[in-house]
Amino acid sequence: MVLGGLLVYPVYQLGLISFLEYTQAQVSGGEPATFQGFGNYAELFGDGEFWRVLLATVVFAAACVVSTLAVGCALAVLLTRVRAVPRLALMLAALGAWATPAVTGSTVWLLLFDPDFGPVNRMLGLGDHSWTYGRYSAFLLVLLEVVWCSFPFVMVTVYAGIRAVPAEVLEAAALDGASQWRIWRSVLAPMLRPILVVVTIQSVIWDFKVFTQIYVMTGGGGIAGQNLVLNVYAYQKAFASSQYSLGSAIGVVMLLILLAVTLVYLRLLRRQGEEL
Amino acid sequence: MNLLRAQVRRPWRLAAEASALLIAVVVAFPLYWMVLSAFKPAGEIESTEPRPWTLTPSLDSFRRVFEQQEFGRYFLNSLIVAGSVVIASALIAFLAATAVTRFRFRFRTTLLIMFLVAQMVPVEALTIPLFFLMRDFGQLNTLGSLILPHIAFSLPFAIWMLRGFVKAVPEALEEAAYIDGASRTRFLWQILFPLVFPGLVATSVFSFISTWNDFLFAKSFIISDTSQSTLPMALLVFYKPDDPDWGGVMAASTVMTIPVLVFFVLVQRRLVSGLGGAVKD
């Protein structure tokens, strides 16, 4: 079984080495790599577009995380309040949304919001308003799709967590006259804190790295790149305009940001006195 | 308490149930629309008066999907990739999770932290170095170039989750098994494996979905040999930004979503208890 651990390690290290490789070797298409030092970073940081994309990514990811968590938790609580049939209906619908591949989900949402043939504009009486044309409406559309496909994970996990809370605790709180909101805030939330930390961190990681939805729904970053997020930006730099080194530099920036998040997460775990 | 609540708060509960049903309908609506559009005849999808039903369902879109492309081949490719990743990562994750929970060795904590950090690494950021790696090994345009990275990237999360399940199995059980004369291997496969199986299912769901949905690796590594393409790529053939073939896209989407749905329905029960077990830890 130690063998098992050793087996994983090379696979794991493979990822690690490849990650080391790209910071050092700024390879450009098989030619001998020349050492650029911080040249790429200087170029990147000097580019106004990079900062614009970075800001958009952070705001967009934050909006996604907050909405996903709010919807997921609210529905998890709702699940505990209803009888079996509505619960099963909601659960199945959520699992369906969860199971939908990102590419599929993106195209379906595009069709729903299509200016000519989509039912949503029809229902809202918006005529042929195009959702992907404006910067903010395009981001909003992608946000809705992201929330739709990622809230089920939060909902199912939090629901499973609430179910694991002993009924007596809730009963005692209710007998003491606590309101629903109060029960959630003062009893459930603290008890569910480890779970909430896990789902929050996972959501941050996932939403910070949204790629498919942006790529498909805004046609690779929107009109004149108005809907680029870091991930798509790196991809476009690297594979569309063959500036692999710049793309890698963006990747490193993303990595550093997420590592910072990891550190916060580890410190939170530590403070709770949890052993790894 | 439940009785009490039922008397006092009946209207509230009804309101909650009504909203739960309503939300379920809203959440399921995109899926319904997808299937519906796949069955609509061409003229009806591209009508400016979209209707939530169709009186003349047709299989035209599906036929177009299966004929025009080598769709069956892509489907098979996707199945091969997802299947190998699920099996390989489940087995490795099981052994590794057992190793890190049941044995104390040097660097154990370091290893655990690394699993966590590995999860945070944006896979997309690694696409560029991986691309060069695959090129150097001559693995571009092969299914292997998709399988290997996916195994590597689904492992950290799988191990991290499985750890909780292995931990939950009392050590006394292990000792009892040894006293009864079971060997280590026997304990591992005949006792521990069935016990953590729900956890394995839950983690498999994650690796299956991430592999099946993968768009980035397929788009980056399968560059010229379209016979090695997977489903997400095939789907986009129908989606041309200026004049998308909506019927084709929706039919292909339906075909692509069904296996995942089937997989989910199969594991649904175990998934909820599995996630519950992982978080209870």
Image: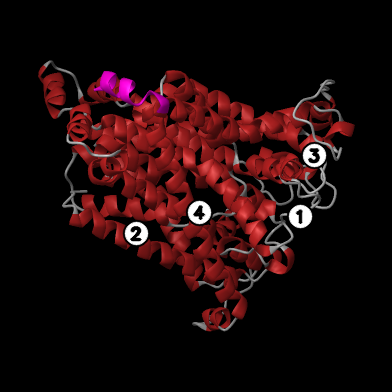
Determine which residue is flagged by label 3: B246
Determine which residue is flagged by label 4: A64
Query: Do discs 3 and 1 belong to a common subunit?
Result: no
Earlier-in-chain disc, 1 versus 2: 1
Earlier-in-chain disc, 2 versus 4: 4
- The amino acid type of the residue labelled 1 equals Ser
Q: Is residue A170 left or right of residue A36?
A: left
* Mark 3 and mark 4: Cα distance apart in space: 27 Å
| Secondary structure mostly seen in the magenta stretch | helix
Q: Indicate the position of residue B192 as horizontal and vertical percent values.
A: 26, 25
* Mark 2 and mark 4: Cα distance apart in space: 19 Å
* Residue B183 figure quarter: top left
Q: Nearer the viewer, residue A200 or A253?
A: A200
Mark 2 — on which chain does it sit? A
The mark closer to the camera, 3 or 1, is 1
Q: Nearer the viewer, residue A271 or B17?
A: B17
Determine which residue is flagged by label 2: A262
Other residues around mark 3 within 10 Å, as few (<14) / some (14–19) / many (≥20): many
Q: Secondary structure at mark 4?
A: helix
Mark 1 — on which chain does it sit? A
Determine which residue is flagged by label 1: A130
Q: Secondary structure at mark 1?
A: loop
